Amino acid sequence: MIRIPQELVDAIVDGVAEARSMKSCALVASKFRNPSQRILLRSLTIKCGYKEQERSNYGALSSLLSESPHIAQHVKRLTLKLPAGQKDLQDVEILQRVLARMTRVKHCSINGTYIRDTRWSTLSASLASAVLDFITRQGLHSLAVACLEDLPNAVLLRLMTFVPRISLSYVLRGEHKSTTIADFHPYHHRYSA
């Protein structure tokens, strides 16, 4: 049996270009599994179900992270697609467990479902709290928020306190006024929108 040094295995896996081949690499041998998972799972999307056409992946992610908790450390870029309106409390509890396992995310995107469909005020208090707790404990390098209506100024200020780079796209507040960084002039020199 030939023994291949882990550094060589890592170099081989780093050279694989397509996701299908990377998935195959993860199944070759245990030496290939972690480097393949690190690349395959560096970007993750957590999505809610929208109306009845689409199902959330909260449960599948929760099961995956329960069976293989080390996978959470590979996720560096996270996209969180928020629901349009109230979600079942059980779904929120599952999402809270998933977010609690994420500890090394550096770039996060929070997206509403569609413009004027997702309102901060219609999110359950536990979901809003879970999202804010996740952001404040992460040590994010950047945060993008898109398609979210009536985001309170207090929430925006909290986000700006914990994330050095924030971009806002189609984020409306109050009476459908666009929020600009000028609204937060004390932060103007440190943050971009």
Image (spheres, rainbow, N blue to C red):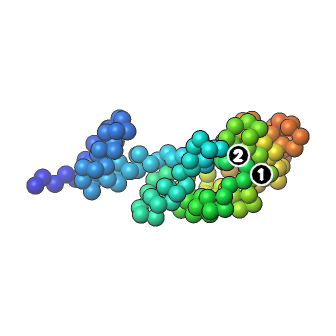
Give neighbour class at mark 1: few <14, some 14-19, many 20+ (Cα, 10 Å).
some
Q: Are marks 1 and 2 in contact (CB under 8 Å)?
A: yes
Residue 62, x across and y down, in percent: 51, 60
Residue 39, x across and y down, in percent: 40, 46
Say which residue appears at 70% left-offset and 46% top-offset.
84
Extreme-front residue of the structure: 52
Residue 166, x across and y down, in percent: 69, 43
Give the structural element (helix, strand or loop) at label 1: helix
Report whether residue 48 is seen: yes
Say which residue appears at 31% left-offset and 49% top-offset.
26
Q: Which mark is residue 84?
A: 2
Residue 97, x across and y down, in percent: 57, 63
Say which residue appears at 12% left-offset and 52% top-offset.
2
Question: In this view of the protein, which residue sits in the foreground, 96 or 33?
Answer: 96
Amino acid at circle 1: Thr
Q: Which mark is residue 122?
A: 1
Between discs 1 and 2, the one toward the N terminus: 2
- Total marks shown come to 2
Q: Which mark is residue 47?
A: none
Give neighbour class at mark 2: few <14, some 14-19, many 20+ (Cα, 10 Å).
many
170 relative position to 97: left or right: right
50 relative position to 14: left or right: right
In the rendered image, the quadrant that contains the N terminus is bottom left
In the rendered image, the quadrant that contains the C terminus is top right
C-alpha gap between disc 1 and disc 2: 8 Å
Say which residue appears at 28% left-offset and 50% top-offset.
27
Question: In this view of the protein, which residue sits in the foreground, 166 or 23?
Answer: 23
Give the structural element (helix, strand or loop) at label 2: loop
Report whether residue 103 is seen: no
Amino acid at circle 2: Ala
